[in-house]
Image (cartoon, helix red, strand yellow):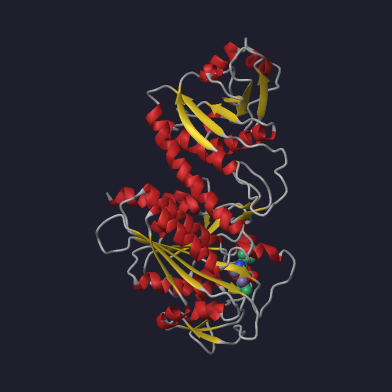
Amino acid sequence: MEVKVITGNITEVEADAIIVNFYEDGKSPEGDTAAVDKALDGAISQLIAQGEIKGKLNEVTVVYSLGKLPAARVVVTGLGKQAELTTSKIRGAVAETCRWLRKRGAANIATIAQGAGVNEISLENSAQAITEGALLGLYSFRQHITREEEKLGEIKSLSIVATSEAKPQLEAGSTKGKILAEATNLARDMVNEPANYMTPSHMAERARELAKRYGLEVTILEREQMAELGMGGLLGVAQGSREPPKFIVLSYKGNDAAEINIALLGKGITFDSGGISIKPSEKLEEMKGDMAGGAAVIAAMAAIAQLKPKLNIMGIVPATENLPDGSALKPGDILTAMNGKTIEIISTDAEGRLILADALCYAKKHGARLLVDAATLTGACRIALGDVCTGAFANNQELVGKVIAAGAEAGELIWQMPMYDEYRELNKSEVADIKNVGGRLGGAITAAKFLAEFVDDTPWVHLDIAGTSMSDKERGYVVKGATGVPVRTLVNLVLSLAKENK
Ligand code: BES
Ligand code: MN
Ligand code: ZN
C-alpha cells in the first residue's frame, strides 16, 4: 500500500472512502468532520444525536454519501475521550478502520490528519501514527498460501489530506512512519517464517541483502571464526544442529569517530526444541519465533540506515538452532564463554543466555559504550507480564529510563524488573564459575543476572520479549502472529540518543 500526503479539502477528495472522526466527549462534529457533515446535510450530526455514533475508541460507523460527496463512503472513526487521545490510540484506531474498509473492498481511501492539534499532537506525529497504523494494521503473512487470495481485497492507497501549509510536516511524519512500520513488518516476516525457511543461514542472507540495500557494513562469522574468538556458548548450543551457526554483525556509521556509541543485540535461535532438555510438544511450533530479538535488531538496523542518526551503531545477532542430536550439548557439560568464564549447563533449554553471553563479550571487545539486547529469553517473563509488557532488566537506571520512554513513544509497553544482588547467588555453580539456570523462582530475573555476568559496568538494558513478540489476537495495529516488538523501541532509542549527542 502507498501512503501519500495530498493537498486539498477532504470534502472534494475522490476515494472509495474518506475517514473523519468523533470524540466520545464531543457534542457535535468539529473541523473537517463538521465540513463533511455539512456536505452530507447533517447526517453525521443526526447519527450522533441518535446515539448511533458514540465516539468510543475504535468505533467505526459508515455513512453513504449518495452523491453528496465525490467519495462514496464516509467513515467516522471513534477516537475516545479527547483529553485522553495519544498517538498510540490514533495508530490503533487507524489500523482498525483500515482493516474494516479492506473487508468491505475499499481500494483507495483518504483521511484527515487524525488528532493533529489535540493534546500537543503535532501534524508530524499525527501523520506518523496514521502511516504506522495503516501499514502495521494491514500486515498479513501469506508467504506460503498457494490458494488464491480470498476476496479480502487490498487497500492500494491511503491519502492524508491537508492544506498546503501542513504538507511538509505531514510528509516528514509519514516518511518516518513508513520507515518504522516497514522495518517492523520486515521483522514480522522473519519471525513468521517457519524454521525450515528461516535458518541461521537465511537470517544471515537477509542481513546481507538489507546491508546492501541500505549501505550497512556486514560481517558474518562462521564456525571457525567463532572458535578462534572462543565463543563457547554459541558453539555449544550449535553442536546439536546440522545447520551452521552464524554470528551476524551489521554496522552503521553515523560519524567519523572510532567509538561505537551503542550495540543492539538480539537472540537468534531459529528453532528452540530445548535440545537434550527437550520441550513438551504442545505449542512447540511457536519456537520458530525464538529469533524475534535477532529479527528486531536486523530490522532496526535497516530503519536506522534510512533515518541516518549521527551515531555509530552495531547490530549483533548470534544465530543457531537448538536441537537434540548425538553430538548435542548435555546437562552437566561445562562451556567456556568468549570472556573466559566457565558455565555449567543445567538445562540445554536455557540456551538464549549462552549465545547472548558471547554476543555481549563481542560487543564489549569492540568497545561499545552502551548495550541493549532483546531476547525471547524466558517463559517466566511471559508468566509475569503476559503479552502486554516487555520486561526490562538493567544495570543503569538512566539508560533503562530512556528505553522505557522510547517504548512508550512507540506504543510498545515496557516494565522494569528488579536486579537486586540477592538474585545473583542463585546462579552460583559448584563446578564452574556460573550455571545457566538459577531455579524456577524469579526465572526471568536470574536469566538477566546471568547475562549481567558478561556485561560488567557498561550501561546495559536487557529486554525479555518472550511474552510480547507474538500475539494470538488482533488488537489495534497488532495482528495475529509476530508483532515486530521491539523494532520501533530500538529505533526511537537510537534517535533520542542521537538528539542529545548533538
Ligand atoms: N525460548 C525460550 C523462552 C520462551 C518461552 C520464549 C515461551 C517464548 C515463549 C527459552 O529458551 C527457554 O526455553 N527458557 C526456559 C529457561 C529455563 C530452562 C530456565 C524457560 O523459560 O522455561
Ligand atoms: Mn530454550
Ligand atoms: Zn529459547
- The image quadrant that residue 301 belongs to is bottom left
Q: Residue at x 51, y 54 (%)?
A: 486
Compared to residue 309, the image places residue 42 above or below, namely above
Residue 383 at what x, y percent from top left?
A: 65, 61
Q: Is residue 89 left or right of residue 248?
A: right
Q: Residue at x 48, y 79 (%)?
A: 223
Residue 36 at what x, y percent from top left?
A: 57, 16
Q: Residue at x 72, y 41 (%)?
A: 150
Residue 425 at what x, y percent from top left?
A: 52, 78
Residue 400 seen = no
Return the residue nearer the eye: 360 or 149.
149
Q: How many marks?
A: 0
Compared to residue 124, the image places residue 442 above or below, namely below
Return the residue nearer the eye: 369 or 134.
134
Compared to residue 236, the image places residue 448 above or below, namely above
Residue 289 seen = yes
Q: Which residue in the rendered view is the most extreme toward the left?
A: 256
Query: Which quadrant is the N terminus positioned in?
Result: top right
Residue 87 at what x, y percent from top left?
A: 50, 37
Q: Which residue in the rendered view is the most extreme toward the bottom?
A: 431
- The image quadrant that residue 271 belongs to is bottom right
Return the residue nearer the eye: 341 or 241.
241
Q: Quadrant of ligand 1?
A: bottom right
Q: Which residue in the rendered view is the most extreme toward the top?
A: 41
- The image quadrant that residue 323 belongs to is bottom right
Return the residue nearer the eye: 141 or 383.
141
Q: Is residue 431 left or right of residue 105?
A: left
Q: Is residue 305 left or right of residue 68?
A: left
